[in-house]
């Protein structure tokens, strides 16, 4: 049972990866991830891309939290960064975030100052 993509740890509580398959969700849960953030807009990759709803259903079935936070480009706004930081603080850890290749997921995390918790 291998994943179609391998998560890359950017800190002990947060990993990023490219597009996951619906079947990957249960495997991610088995690896200990408790939340998934989907940074990819639905349909961006054409009809072969799993829908957010399908991944969300698999996450719920695996007992994981799921959030669809689509970002269309690397042009990240301060509002998105603020919302993403709060999201990372509120979700159960560890978190895996994905997009097409992992770049946007990583850029969002880096923009938060690599923080998954609330600021002191």
Image (cartoon, rainbow, N blue to C red):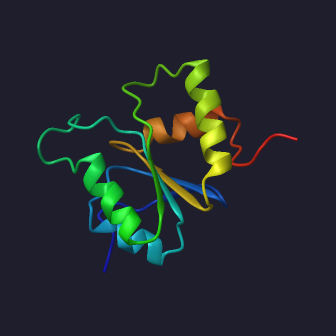
Query: Number of numbered discs present?
Result: 0
**Above or below 20: residue 101:** above
Q: Measured along the vertical axis of the image, is residue 52 above or below residue 3?
A: above
Location of residue 23 by image quarter: bottom left
Residue at image location 71% in from the left, 44% down from the top = 115
Q: Horizontal placement of 98 versus 2: left or right? A: right
Coordinates of residue 92 in the picture (x, y in percent): 61, 60
In the image, residue 77 sits, relative to residue 26, either above or below, namely above
- On the image, the x and y values in percent for residue 94 come to 60, 62
> In this image, 25 relative to 117: left or right?
left
Residue 3 x %, y %: 33, 69
Of 10 and 39, nearer the camera is 39
The x and y percentages for residue 99 are 38, 43
Quadrant containing the C terminus in the rendered view = top right
Which residue: 52% across, 67% down? 33
Quarter of the image where the N terminus is located: bottom left
State the image quarter where residue 45 is shown.
top left
Residue shown at 23% from the left, 34% from the top: 44
Q: Residue furthest left?
A: 47
- 54 and 98: which one is in front? 54
């Amino acid at each position: 049972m291998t994943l179609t993509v391998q998560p890359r740890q950017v800190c002990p509580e947060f990993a990023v990866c490219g597009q996951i398959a619906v079947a990957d969700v249960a495997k991610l849960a088995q690896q200990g991830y408790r939340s998934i953030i989907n940074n990819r807009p639905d349909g961006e990759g054409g009809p072969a891309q799993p829908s957010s709803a399908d991944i969300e259903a698999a996450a719920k079935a695996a007992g994981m939290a799921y959030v669809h936070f689509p970002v269309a480009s690397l042009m990240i706004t301060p509002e998105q960064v603020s919302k993403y930081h709060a999201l990372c603080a509120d979700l159960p850890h560890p978190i895996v975030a994905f997009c097409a290749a992992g770049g946007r997921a990583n850029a969002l995390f880096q923009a938060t100052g690599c923080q998954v918790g609330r600021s002191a």
